[in-house]
């Protein structure tokens, strides 16, 4: 397998994440350019490595012009190599913010391509389960080069099969996922949320807290397809959008999955043959740009705190507590043990119901074994609870060096190089390059 690496020329590094690096490579067989993700196996546990291989297996079944194509996948004892289409056109947020202005017709083109990809995947028995703007890229600078990526949470299913695994990004998750009984209709809900966001510049279901369950509970109340003042799960007054666009959103955000359009129907909706076009309001672009940067800052903060917790006081202290609740001493927790341990650690500060805890448990239990190991619990706790502690975030931010009292792309790069154990990726560096230097107060405000 190692010899397969020799079939590629490694041109330049495109990025670095917590689990590996991405290179631009050229195939010696056909001289085409690809993106090669090199994943370091020791940074994965058995479950996540299994999920990564499952993702490659699913992508290997998909061949569609609007789905990122898996060219090759091979591994050595220490690394996994995933060779994908090289998508140089940027992600959806970047396209909209860099374009300067855009029209309803641009959104119409993007959503049509997403629906075509999803209809194809559903016909193959595959639910994406994590559709969101970050998972929509462009192959080129052209608007008609949309590509769906990241099938890491995808599920294979049959038409008559109910899915029970809970996963995805809360702002785009369909409410029936709370009931752990869903079908491929969850992808159509996510597309409905994205369509609304791209046309109006904000999410229809939003929460002032960072608790993922709050987004889902708000979505469970449904979408009101009428015009009202203010922002919320309804159409805002005074915004010029084609009536067909509103009808599509209404049809995709139906609370009952059986009332929602299926992908095959949705891609033939009258909106896609409409010639009506409007320039989208200026604040839409501003809000979209803010959302991209806001997401990047919050991912950076959560990652820092998670890594800090995992290398600090947390591991030994939590292991001691978990051993108290691991009744049979097998190193894993069932749902009852998980609930008791979680209440002990949070001191009821998050007031999670039994139903909420059950949903969290099933989200962590990727292989549906009915048990999670202690390492998985520690990582979950660090990410979901420590990262919401503002004082912990502030203490870490204070460690970042400044230049003339400003946090810059260079100072983040220095911090990253000084602390390789934190596995900081390049996203926050790229954001600061675009936004420019920030004083500590503004930097913290973006994060918290």
Image: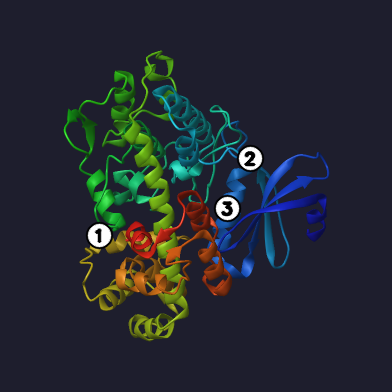
How far across and down, in percent of the image, does residue 306 sit? 43, 70
* Circle 3 residue: 54
Specify which label sits upstream in the sequence, 3 or 2.
3
Q: Quadrant of the C terminus?
A: bottom left
View extreme (front): residue: 404
**Horizontal side, residue 353 vs residue 141: left or right:** left
Specify which label sits upstream in the sequence, 1 or 2.
2
* Circle 1 residue: 355
Q: Comparing marks 3 and 2, which lies closer to the viewer?
A: 2
Query: Whole-Å distance between the Cαs marked 3 and 2?
Result: 15 Å
Compare residues 378 and 426 and report the one nearer the observer: 426
Query: Whole-Å distance between the Cαs marked 1 and 3?
Result: 28 Å
Q: Which mark is residue 120?
A: none
Q: Residue at x 41, y 13 (%)?
A: 275
Specify which label sits upstream in the sequence, 1 or 3.
3
**Horizontal side, residue 217 vs residue 162: left or right:** left
How far across and down, in percent of the image, does residue 2 sit? 79, 60
**Horizontal side, residue 216 vs residue 71: left or right:** left
Compare residues 301 and 401 and report the one nearer the observer: 401
Q: Residues within 10 Å of mark 1 (few under 14, many from 20)?
A: few
Residues at marks 1 and 2 touching, judged by CB atoms closer than 8 Å? no
Q: Residue at x 33, y 37 (%)?
A: 201
Q: Residue at x 34, y 35 (%)?
A: 284
The number of numbered discs placed on residues in the rendered structure image is 3
Compare residues 252 and 304 and report the one nearer the observer: 304
Residues at marks 3 and 2 touching, judged by CB atoms closer than 8 Å? no
Q: Residues within 10 Å of mark 2 (few under 14, many from 20)?
A: many
Q: Residues within 10 Å of mark 3 (few under 14, many from 20)?
A: some
Mark 3 element type? helix
Mark 1 element type? helix
Q: Comparing marks 1 and 2, which lies closer to the viewer?
A: 2
* Circle 2 residue: 69
């Amino acid at each position: 397998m190692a010899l397969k690496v020799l079939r590629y020329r490694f041109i330049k590094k495109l990025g670095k994440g917590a689990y590996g690096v991405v290179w631009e490579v050229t195939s010696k067989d056909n001289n085409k350019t690809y993106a090669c993700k090199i994943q370091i196996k020791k940074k994965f546990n058995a479950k996540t490595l299994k999920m990564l291989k499952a993702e490659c297996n699913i992508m290997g079944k998909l061949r569609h012009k609007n789905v990122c194509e898996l060219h090759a996948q091979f591994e050595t004892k220490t690394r996994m190599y995933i060779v994908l289409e090289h998508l140089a056109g940027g992600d959806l947020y970047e396209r909209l913010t860099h374009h300067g202005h855009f029209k309803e017709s641009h959104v119409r083109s993007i959503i049509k391509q997403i629906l075509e990809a999803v209809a194809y995947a559903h016909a193959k028995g595959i639910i994406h389960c994590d559709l969101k703007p970050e998972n929509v890229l462009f192959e080129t600078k052209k608007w008609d080069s949309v590509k769906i990526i990241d099938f890491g949470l995808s599920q294979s299913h049959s038409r008559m099969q109910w899915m029970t695994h809970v996963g995805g990004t809360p702002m785009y998750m369909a409410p029936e996922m709370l009931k752990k009984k869903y079908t491929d209709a969850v992808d159509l809900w996510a597309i409905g949320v994205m369509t609304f966001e791209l046309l109006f510049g904000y999410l229809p279901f939003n929460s002032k807290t960072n608790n993922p369950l709050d987004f889902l509970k708000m979505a469970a109340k449904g979408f009101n397809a009428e015009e009202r003042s203010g922002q919320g799960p309804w159409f805002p007054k005074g915004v010029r959008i084609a009536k067909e666009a509103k009808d599509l959103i209404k049809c995709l955000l139906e609370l009952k999955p059986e009332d929602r359009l299926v992908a095959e129907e949705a891609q033939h909706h009258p909106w896609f043959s409409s010639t009506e076009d409007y320039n989208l309001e200026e604040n839409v672009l501003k809000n979209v740009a803010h959302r991209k940067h806001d997401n990047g800052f919050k991912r950076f903060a959560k990652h820092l705190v998670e890594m800090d917790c995992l290398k600090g006081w947390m591991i030994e202290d939590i292991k001691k507590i978990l051993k108290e609740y691991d009744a049979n001493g097998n190193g894993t927790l069932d749902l009852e043990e998980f609930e008791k341990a979680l209440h002990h650690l949070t001191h009821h500060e998050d007031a999670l119901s039994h139903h909420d805890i059950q949903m969290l448990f099933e989200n962590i239990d990727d292989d549906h074994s009915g048990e999670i190991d202690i390492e998985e619990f520690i990582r979950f706790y660090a990410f979901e609870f420590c990262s919401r502690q503002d004082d912990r975030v502030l203490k870490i931010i204070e460690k970042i060096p400044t230049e003339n009292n400003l946090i810059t792309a260079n100072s983040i790069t220095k911090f990253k190089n000084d602390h390789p154990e934190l596995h900081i990726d390049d996203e926050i560096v790229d954001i600061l390059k675009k936004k420019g230097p920030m004083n500590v107060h503004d930097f913290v405000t973006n994060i918290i």
